[in-house]
């Protein structure tokens, strides 16, 4: 009887400890700082799953959700990952398919994804503290110069995107005078951003990145001179030139992002083969092969 009671007590003790251990909350730190999530992460098949909002807000990646296909797309300037709910196959950069050991899933109407797989594929170092139930993430941060370039590039693109919105999608909502007024406002903002970029000066570590950023703002400055002729004066030649400039700007921004990503890691920038084809064709006669255009557009989406 005593042996039975002893065994029962041991079992109850172990059951209680196991239950508590399994119910422990998981903490996530990024570069030494604890990150709060709106819903709790949990462990499944020895992998930590986190709410998708954590990926977009804490790690600062773009996240898209396709309800029809139940697909989650996560991307930044240099990488894209596509996951499908309840499926372990993952598509990386549109052409590489790998099989993860745990699938993303929907729990309590929230989408959860495996944090280690995603973080490591984006170059984030991941570690696990089993004693304290802590996921430790270490993400390389840009220095002040590189971060300034990235921020100014983002501001520059945002202003030009707003200009396109007014002149294309929303043009019918405004009078000519209203469009001209908005144009002058955005032009002033763009010129201010350009002045800040030009005042930065070059940096030996980021020589290529800065070169591409300067070329981007030169294209943007030229675009500003074409908008009114192209869209308000209905000048077909100016309209065609504006479209060409928009294409060149998108590609130049892509070059800037790739160069910044490489140089921030101490690597040499290597020109993308399709971008090289575009640049070579543009130097010759401004004509592009259809396949080159298609490849570039797919990459810039």
Image (cartoon, helix red, strand yellow):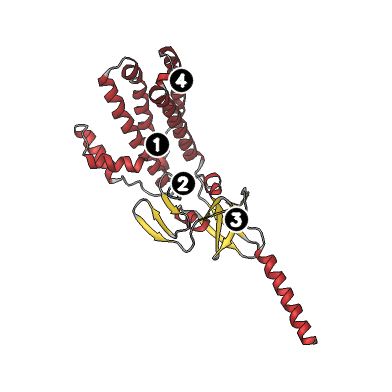
Would you call the spot at circle 4 few (<14 residues within 10 Å), some (14-19), or many (20 or more)? few
Instruction: Write down the residue under mark 4.
Output: 188
Rendering quarter of residue 166: top left
Q: Nearer the viewer, residue 154 or 208?
A: 154
State the residue at coordinates (37%, 36%): 253
- Which residue is disc 3 drawn over? 41
Separation (CA) of disc 3 from disc 4: 46 Å
Q: Residue visible at 42% across and 51% down? A: 81
* First along the sequence among labels 1 and 3: 3
- Residue receiving disc 1: 210
Where 181 falls versus 32 (above or below)?
above
Determine the CA span between mark 1 and mark 3.
40 Å
Circle 2: element type:
loop
Residue at mark 2: 67
Distance between the Cα atoms at labels 1 and 4? 22 Å
255 over 225 or under it: above or below: below
Q: Identify which residue, 281 or 60, lies in the foreground.
A: 60
Q: Earlier in the sequence, mark 1 or mark 4?
A: 4
**CB under 8 Å between discs 1 and 2:** no
């Amino acid at each position: 009887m005593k042996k039975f009671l002893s065994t029962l007590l041991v079992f109850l003790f172990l059951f209680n400890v196991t239950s508590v251990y399994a119910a422990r909350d998981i903490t996530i730190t990024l570069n030494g700082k604890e990150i709060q999530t709106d819903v709790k992460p949990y462990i499944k098949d020895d992998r930590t799953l986190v709410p998708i909002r954590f990926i977009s807000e804490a790690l600062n990646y773009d996240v898209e959700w396709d309800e029809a296909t139940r697909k989650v797309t996560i991307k930044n300037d240099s990488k894209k990952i596509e996951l499908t709910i309840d499926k372990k196959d993952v598509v990386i950069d549109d052409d590489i398919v790998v099989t993860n050991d745990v699938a993303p899933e929907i729990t309590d109407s929230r989408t959860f994804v495996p944090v280690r797989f995603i973080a490591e594929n984006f170059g984030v170092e991941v570690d696990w503290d089993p004693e304290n139930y802590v996921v430790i993430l270490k993400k390389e941060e840009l220095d002040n110069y590189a971060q300034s370039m990235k921020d100014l590039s983002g501001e520059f693109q945002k202003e030009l995107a707003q200009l396109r919105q007014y002149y294309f999608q929303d043009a019918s909502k405004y009078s000519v005078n209203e469009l001209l007024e908005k144009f002058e406002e955005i032009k002033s903002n763009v010129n201010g951003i350009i002045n800040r970029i030009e005042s930065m000066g070059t940096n030996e570590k980021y020589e290529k990145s800065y070169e591409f950023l300067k070329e981007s703002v030169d294209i943007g400055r030229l675009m500003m001179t074409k908008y009114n002729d192209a869209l308000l004066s209905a000048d077909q030649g100016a309209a065609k030139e504006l479209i060409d400039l928009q294409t060149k700007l998108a590609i130049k921004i892509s070059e800037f992002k790739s160069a910044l990503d490489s140089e921030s890691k101490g690597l040499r920038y290597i020109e993308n083969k399709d971008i090289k084809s575009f640049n070579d064709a543009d130097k010759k006669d401004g004509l592009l092969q259809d396949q080159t255009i298609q490849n570039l557009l797919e990459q810039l989406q």
